[in-house]
Image (cartoon, rainbow, N blue to C red):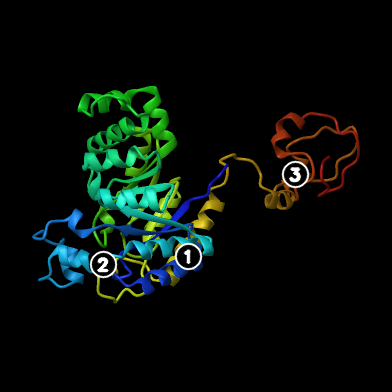
Amino acid sequence: MDNHIFIIAEAGVNHNGNPDMAFQLVDAAFDAGADAVKFQTFKTENTVTKKALKADYQKLSTSADESQFSMLKSLELSNDVYYELLNYCNKKGIKFLSTAFDFESLDFLVKNLCIDTLKIPSGEITNGPLLLAHAVTARNLIVSTGMATIEEIEKALSVIAFGLTGAKVKPSKIAFQSAYHSENGQQLLKEKVTLLHCTTEYPAPPEEINLRAIETMRDKFGLSVGYSDHSEGITVPIAAATLGVSLIEKHFTLDKTLSGPDHKASLEPDELKAMVSSVRTVEKIMGDGLKVPRPSELNNRDVARKSLVAAIDIQAGEKFSEKNLTVKRPGTGRCPMEYWELLGEECSEDFMTDEIIT
């Protein structure tokens, strides 16, 4: 049974638009033992209007007077830097991933960087055109579901199923539903899509994490489900690992005190390493689900268990009775579960007091 959980170290925009910091984040993710490091690729002009407001958590960690447009513009990396990051990840031996927030960025990731897995962020789960553009690439898709209802997730999966099946009809609600409910559509969703449970707040309050939604989503959609964590610390992702998630994503930074929208809700390198180590331990402890003695237990079984023992001297031909039988360690003789069957039987040999019945 493969219990391996794919761990994505989410660098996001925690490079603050500085290429040197981006490479340092790759190093930190690799040193922590993550399977992949993920960035966010976007063209601000294609992503947000110039008058769009920032989220409350962004105002707390960046200038409150700054627009979302200005903030994001300062966090962009050039395409050349992404080429270099991809090559650097390949040399280090860690998978490079990035989230596309617009069509131009998606095109770049697919056609230029040729990455095989795409992450659809929570904010885009109702962006039908971008969902479809992701689906028709035929890449593996990780779909984050923060802020979404079950109904919204199903609608998103319907659009994705339409794209994956290569339907030749005009996109429409009916066509999406038809693709989603088709045998081919369901099979392709199972092959290509991993859903991520997520609470979109930075940091996410513990009482709003709702890890039980992982099982709800798995039961409802029959797809692989992972967890994208925005809580403080490493407790929640470790707990998620015990629920059978296939993937864990966690934001990390070089320094939580840096200015920027996501640093405060991110792990520092030592914390990321501790999280990865703990998740790997959970993988081991989950086991195969079979209730059988484990190798290390076998050495202890005879010591811990008990056997039927002569309570007093017993002569050959004498019948076993409640008076002359007792139960003591070690467990190398007849099992005490045979006690009632042995009562009344004739003893075939002599047993001294405290001698194990064989």
Residue designated by label 2: 75
Residue type highlighted by circle 2: Leu
Residue type highlighted by circle 3: Ser
Q: Nearer the viewer, mark 3 or mark 1?
A: 1
Instruction: Work out how far the residue at label 3 is from the one at label 1, CA to CA, in angstroms.
Output: 63 Å
Q: Is residue 251 above or below residue 65?
A: above
Label 3 residue SS: strand
Residue designated by label 3: 307
Q: 10 Å neighbourhood of mark 3: few (<14), some, or many (≥20)?
A: many
Q: 10 Å neighbourhood of mark 1: few (<14), some, or many (≥20)?
A: some
Q: Nearer the viewer, residue 175 or 235?
A: 175
Q: Are marks 1 and 2 in contact (CB under 8 Å)?
A: no
Q: Nearer the viewer, residue 315 or 227?
A: 227
**What residue is drawn where x is 42% and y is 65%?**
84
Residue 121 placement, left or right of 68: right
Residue 152 in view of the camera:
yes
